[in-house]
Amino acid sequence: MAAAVAMRSGGGGCLEKQQMDMGKYVRYTPEQVEALERVYAECPKPSSMRRQQLIRECPILSNIEPKQIKVWFQNRRCRDKQRKEASRLQAVNRKLTAMNKLLMEENERLQKQVSQLAHENAFMKQQLQKTSLAIDTSCESVVTTPQNPLRDTSNPAGLLSIAEETLAEFLSKATGTAVEWVQMPGMKPGPDSVGIVAISHGCSGVAARACGLVNLEPTKIVEVLKDRPSWFHECRSLEVFTMFPAGNGGTIELVYTQMYAPTTLAPGRDFWTLRYTTGLEDGSLVVCEKSLSGSGGGPNPATVHQFIRAEMLPSGYLIRPCEGGGSIVHIVDHLDFEAWSVPEVLRPLYESSMVVAQKMTTAALRHIRQIAQETSGEEVYTLGKQPAVLRTFSRRLSRGFNDAINGFNDDGWSLMGSDGVEDIIIAANPTKKFRADANSATTFSVAGGIICAKASMLLQSVPPALLVQFLREHRSEWADYNIDAYSAASLKAGSCSSPGLRPARFSGSQVIMPLAHTVENEEFLEVVRLEGQALTQGEAILSRDVHLLQLRSGIDDNAVGSCFQLVFAPIDELFPDDALLLPSGFRVIPLDVKTDALVSSRTLDLASSLDIGSVRNHSSREASPTVHNLRSVLTIAFQFPYEVHLQDTVAAMARQYVRSIVSAVQRVSMAIAPSRPGPTVGQKLLPGSPEASTLARWIFHSYNYHLGQDLLRSENDSAESLLKMLWHHEDAILCCSFEVQPVFTFANQAGLDMLETSLVALQDISLDKIFDETGRQALCSEFAKLMEQGYVYLQAGVCLSGMGRSVAYEKAITWKVLSEDNSFHCLAFCFINWSFV
C-alpha cells in the first residue's frame, strides 16, 4: 500500500528502489506535491543549496530529508523524459501507419495497372491474329475518349460541367490508372523521405505525382497550396478573375497564371484555367484545375506577347484527413509547355516529367512540410526573425532575380542598344518599383532607375553544384569589391554615383553566417560580410563592411532540371524586415541526367586534383564517356542602381563587369571540368603535388614507417584501394604543404567536414588559422621533435573550422609524408574523435 501511495504522489519505480535502500518510503501529501511541482516548473534540476532552501522556505516539507527531495526530482525528470519519448514514438508510429496505408494503396493501384496492361496486351494479340483486315483503324485504341463539344464558359452550368469532368479526370490520375506512373529515379519512399514521387511514362505532355504525410489540417493545406506564388518560385502571378459557388459546397474560379522563364533564352508561360475546390463524401478536400479553351488575355493584354500560352491538363491536390491528426496529400501536375517554342538545346527542360517533379510537385510537398514544422514549433528562430519572415526574404530574392532575367514590359523594363557584340543583354528600368512579394501592396522605389546586365551560356561537363560552391566560397576570384560597395552605398544612401569615383579594396576575407534552411536542405539563406578597406580618408563610408543577403539552392547534382542558384543582394547590417533588395547572381540548370556511378568517380576525381587553379588532365580510364555529354545552362544577371544622368556610364560599367564575370566562370569551368579523353591524355603530375592515389600511398607507407603500425587496414595494397579507404576514414586526415606557406592541400571527407569546407576551397585555409593559441604553441614546441623523429602526438585541444566554429579533438597525430625518394613532401595530420562544440 505504501508503494502504491508513493507511485501516485510523485514516486515511481526508481524512487521505490532508491528509497528501499534508505530503509523507508515517503508519503507525499497533495500540498507537498504541489509545492515541489511549482519548483520543478521553474528549475527541473535544483542544486543541493536550492533544495535545502526549499525545505527552509516551505514548512510543509520540513519532515522530508534533502536526499528524499533529490530522489523526487530525479524521478520527476525521469517521468518527463519517458512521456516525451512515448509521445515521440506515438508520432513515429502514426507516421509509419499512414505511410504503410499509402504504400498499400500504391501497391493496389499498381496491381490494377498491371491487370489493365495484361488485358490490353491480350486484346492486341487477338487483333493481330485476325487476318481478315490488313488495316483496321477502329482497333487502334482500346479506350477512346470522345471530345466533348465546346461549352459556353460564361455559363455557370457549363463551367460546373467542366469542373465535374476535371474532378473525375484528376482523381483517376491521383489514385487510379489513367496515367502510367513510374517511380522517380533516385527517390525511395520511406518514413523520412519527402514522400512517394512518380513521373509519367508514355502520356501526352509531362506529368508528375507525389503523395506524402503532412502534419497539418486539410483546410490549412488547401489554403497554402492554392497560394501558388508563395511556394512556387517560378510563378510570377496568379489572379482570380471570377469566383462563384458550385452549388454543392464547392467553389469554381477562373484563374490567370503567369510563370517566369528560367533563362534569358526562352519566353515565359501563361495559363488560363478553371479551378474547382470541393469536398468528397469521405471528408477529403480536392482542388483540381484544367486549362480552358479560348484566349483569356489576363490583367494586361499588352504584355501577352511576352508569354507562350501553355496547357494545364487535369491536375490538382487531394487532401485526405488522417486518423490521429495530419493529412495524406496527393499532388498531380500534368502540363504541356509547348516545347516547340524554345531552342532545341533547352527542350529537355520543357519535355521532361522529372523537371515538373523537381520544380513543382515535390516543391509543393516540401513547402507544406516546412509550414507544418514551423507550426509545430520545431523551427529555431535566427537573429530574432520568425521563419515566415526569413521565408519571405528567400521568396523576394528569387522573385527579384526572376524579374531581372525576364525583364517584363509591364514592370518597366526596356532593352538598351548593344555595343556591337551581342553577348550581354542590357535592360533599363527608369521607374522600377519593388514589391515585397507577389501579393503584397508594399512597394519600394529607387532614385533614378535600375540597369540589368544579363547573359546565358551553355556549359559542357561542368558539375553545377561544384560550380556554385566555388562561386560562393571564392568570391574574390570573380567579384569586384568596388561594385559591391557601390551598390550597397547607393541603396543605403538613396543616391547613385559612379563606382569609379569611389576607390576601395577588398581585404579578401568574407564571413558567411547561416540564417535558415528548408526541411530537405534544398535552400539556404545566409548573410555574407565582406571586409573592405578605403584607399582614401575621404571615402570612409566604404571602409565599412559590406553585407549581402544570399540564397543558395540545389542539392541533387544528378537530377535534370534541378535549379542550382546563388542569388544575393546588398542589405543593411541592421537587417530590417522591409529591407530593399536588388538581387543579382547565378543560376545553373542541368540539361542531362547523370548516373550515380559518375558521382562517386567525380568525388575521387576532385580528390586527385590538388591544384584548382590549373587545367587538369586525367587518364582515359578515369574519364567516363558520359561525362562529356553532360550539359547545363548558366544564366547570369546583375542589377545596378543609377541616377538619370549616369545611365549610359552605369550601363557601360555593367556590360564590362558581367563580361569579366563570364570570363572568370569560363576559367573556373575549365579548371573543374574533367578533360576529354584523347590520345595525348595521360597521367599528369602537378608541380609539387602528386596524383591523389600516389599521395594516399605515400601517406600510408610514411605512417607505417614512422609509427610502426598501419593507418589503413587493407588486404589490397593497391593505390586506388588505399585512396578509397583514406577518403572514407572515420578520422579527419589533412595534408599541409610548406612550399610557400603552410596551407592545406588535401583532406579526406571527414577532414572536409571538420573544416566545413570543400576541396575547391581547402587551399584558402592555412595551418595557423585552424589552431588556437594553445594549439599553435603546442605544435611549435613539438616541431623540432617532429622533424627529427618523424611524428609526434598532440594532446586534446580545440581548433577552428573554415566557418569559424570551434572543433574539439581527443588526440591528434602528425607525421612527415615522404615521397618515393624519401624526401620530405608534406605534413599529415590525423584528428581523432573530433566534434563541434
Image (cartoon, rainbow, N blue to C red):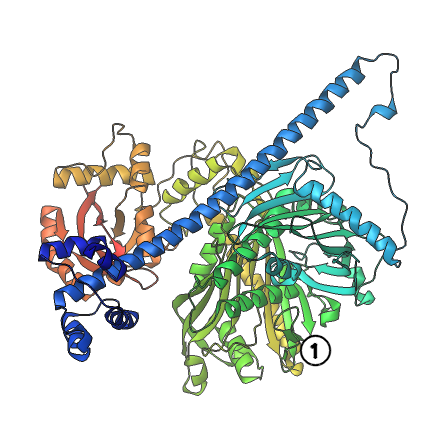
Q: Is residue 279 left or right of residue 822?
A: right
- In the image as oriented, which residue stretches furthest toward the front? 1
Q: Is residue 806 left or right of residue 478?
A: left
Q: Secondary structure at mark 1?
A: loop
Q: Amino acid at mark 1?
A: Thr
Judge left or right: residue 628 versus residue 124.
left
Residue situated in front as seen by the camera: 630 or 123: 123
Q: What quarter of the picture does the N terminus occupy?
A: bottom left
Residue 32 visible to the viewer: yes
Q: Position of residue 673 (x, y in %)?
A: 48, 45
Query: Nearest the camera: 775 or 139?
Result: 139
Rendering quarter of residue 202: top right
Depth check, front residue: 46 or 793: 46
Asked if 180 appears above or below 230 in the picture, the reply is above
- Please say if 573 is above or below 438: below
Q: Is residue 282 above or below residue 373?
A: above
Q: Is residue 544 above or below residue 260?
A: below
Circle 1 packing at 10 Å, graded few (<14), some (14-19), many (20+), is: some
Question: Number of labelled discs?
Answer: 1
Q: x, y (%) of residue 390?
A: 50, 68
Query: Dividing the picture into quarters, in which one does residue 216 lie?
Result: bottom right
Residue 492 locus on image (x, y percent): 53, 81
Residue annotated with mark 1: 431
In the image, 476 versus 354, the foreground residue is 354
Quarter of the image that includes the C terminus: bottom left
Query: Quick one: which residue is furthest to the bottom in this view?
Result: 538
Is residue 424 visible from the viewing direction of this image? no
x, y percent for residue 128 = 79, 16
